[in-house]
Amino acid sequence: MTVSQQIPVATLGVPRIGRRRELKFALESYWSGKSCGAELLTMAKALRAASWEEQHDRGVSKIPSNDFSLYDHVLDTAAMVGAVPSRYAWNGGEVPLDTYFAMARGGQAQTEHCGCARHQHADGHSLTAMEMTKWFDTNYHYIVPELEDNQTFTLSSTKPIDHFLEAKALGIHTRPVILGPVTFLKLAKSRAEGFNTIALLPRLLPVYEELLRTLKLAGADWLQIDEPALVLDLNPNERAAFEFAYGQLSTVAPELKIMLATYFGPLGDNLETAISLPIAGLHLDLVRAPEQLETVGRLAPKDLVLSLGLIDGRNVWRANLTAILDRIKPVVAGWPLARVEIAPSCSMLHVPIDLRMETALDADLRSWLAFAAQKTDELVILARALSQGRGAVADELKASADAAAARATSSKIHDPLVEGRTAGINGAMKQRTSAFAERSRVQARALGLPRFPTTTIGSFPQTAEVRKARAAHGRGQLSYVDYETFLKKETEAAIRWQEEIGLDVLVHGEFERNDMVQYFAEQLSGFAFTEHAWVQSYGSRYVRPPIIFGDVSRPNPMTVRWWEFAQSLTQKPVKGMLTGPVTILNWSFVRDDLSRAEVCRQIALAIRDEVTDLEKSGAKMIQIDEAAFREGLPLRKCGRQFYLDWAVECFRLASTGVQDATQIHTHMCYSEFNEIIGVIAELDADVISIETSRSAMELLDAFTSSKYPNEIGPGVYDIHSPRVPEVAEISALLSLARERLSDAQLWVNPDCGLKTRNWEEVRPSLVNMVTAARALRERMQA
Ligand code: GLN
Ligand code: ZN
């Protein structure tokens, strides 16, 4: 490379939430009526200004604008193109703030959150919110655009232009970011059955064209268009849509250069399409797919700027910069500087803001981490090394290599006992002693349950009182003893009440748990926690995922004490309640120096230890929740079997170390089973509870057609709504379930845990559920 000009540095997008979660607090204050729209907008503007200035000061040359969003960037795009469903009674013009929030949250701002970070429902009386779902394979959730088959589009928000001008007024020239038209349509759902949203492209493009012209007039010279759909399996029609869209867009404002951003995986078989588009630049995710650099470099036109996504935008680890430079050197050595831009693999929306805020973290661990601010510095160092030679940043490169070396050999990470245990995993450890048919006979004798046994999924309401007590304990204002006493009282009351209403299989209620993953992660070795490292899950909901930094083991039993206490209060069986290894993995930041499968095996062995201890203490039923089992599915079909194989293996490792008589339950709170139904059977749990009530049991068809052999509890009431289901409704659902399953298979339970509900809703609902199950038993005997 010739040394002279500087290679540009881009960030693609940065966290929006504010270092101290300012956006969350401003939103919630606005929603609760404590502040007005102008105050919210002022706060948002200040956050944008601070983030632009910080990027500028750190040396970013392609600073994004319009990456900020009050709620979600897909919702912003829907609002921008005027795709506002008719129920929001929008009459054209700029989409008002309250319409925007109604689309996100429903008319009365009722949101419910079950821990699976997916459900959100307005209550029956208010305007329903639009649906929400996971953004590709991240834990960020976007609002799903709803389109009619005769949908029309108009430019209905000037946000990209406004934000560009806002930065310009501060003296900062930005590269606006928008979500591309093809990905937007692909993510949208159509209200008309069987209608393909991609067909709306010719109608949508004029809006994008108008936007591009306006941006050009406002002074933009580059525009980042995100098209992550290019890393998915696409059909020829969808590929053609890319050619059509970019063919059109390239002609409207020829001097406005397009950087087309792809991320979350390799372009794979879409590579030819991507490099043939009339665009000025192409961004590649070289963390998930480093191998595509060579191919793209060879095949792409020489004047196509390649944005190299070299720093991981999805994880929290500090990079070994020298290793990165060494890796790309053979490919980029002969390239002109003007061909290259340096960037993170994807927008940094998915990582926390600034490591410097984590003052309590272990110093070694801290030296191995990088959040958005530190990753930005890494990008600048890489760009300088490439444009000025490594000597220009020798100190920085050395520091990064030293940290990598220290991490690789640290005893904080490597536990020979754990590594020995995973190496010793054998087939017998993934197999119950007997097949289900035999086990179920033994269990039926041991448990003596009635037909259609009733149970719940685990948690009871996390009331304000429970949360207050936990917070007070956390702050040191409530002593350990008093907190324990309080939790025991709650647990005892829950057990007494479950007995009273006649549930067959009881739960302790999970009052002691803050979160179904964190509770376990806090008790396992190899996990670390942060104070301020929030990332957006959806809207104003942020999470602080645990960081798995080292080999995982379980120093002490985690739940046995609570189970023993609960069981000591009753003759009825109380289920042991655990979170499964795959879910713990999928909801954490995972170390990048070991395969995910291997990390998951370590967690599985830790859970296996807990299962063993629960059984030893006398637990006859143990539930292992895998709420996020499906979430880890790779984006492309070709990667899925591999994932499913090791995910199943890990669940089995965790769950099969028990006697035939011990009944293993699992729970999955989502609905799309068709694709993975075979795999669910392979888990070989004795009982699985799933979410089905809202689809009127249709989901069970997957279980019926595959002749699912084990027992199932299809949820008979929708816990995501505050509505109390009538006995008749539950009975009707049970009849539907019986059309699809044999009576011997059927359990009766809600859709999911009850932690987001209050007792006023839970009590009558569960009473009705038990009544419906008993009525059914009586009808059978008559
Ligand atoms: N046992 C957990 C609960 O009831 C399961 C939650 C979930 O799967 N989201 O809360
Ligand atoms: Zn659930």
Image (tube, grey):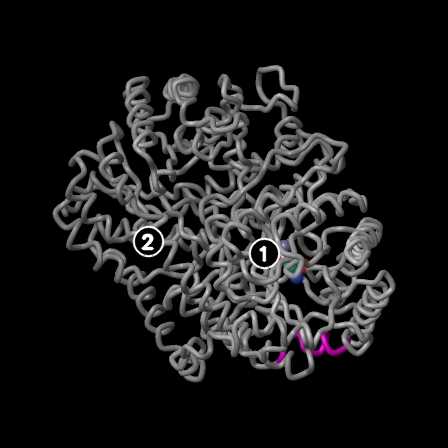
Which of the marked residues, 1 or 2, is nearer the chain's N terminus?
2
> Residue, x 58% and y 36% (percent of image)?
70
Q: Taken as a whole, is the magenta stretch helix, strand or loop?
A: helix
Alpha-carbon distance for marks 1 and 2? 30 Å
Q: In the image, is 455 to the left or to the right of 76?
A: right
Q: Which residues are magenta?
A: 557-565
> Residue, x 56% and y 66% (percent of image)?
685
What is the three-letter code of the residue carrying label 1? Answer: Met
Residue that extends furthest to the left in the rendered view of this protein? 334
- Ligand 2 has an atom within 8 Å of the beta carbon of the residue at disc 1: yes
Q: Is residue 514 magenta?
A: no
Q: Nearer the viewer, residue 238 or 282?
A: 238
The x, y position of residue 51, in whole percent, is 49, 42
Residue located beneath label 2 in the image: 287
**Quarter containing the C terminus:** bottom right
**In the rendered image, the vertical position of residue 20 relative to residue 128, given as above or below:** below
Query: How many numbered marks have been drawn onto this rendered protein structure?
Result: 2
Q: Is residue 560 magenta?
A: yes
Residue located beneath label 1 in the image: 668
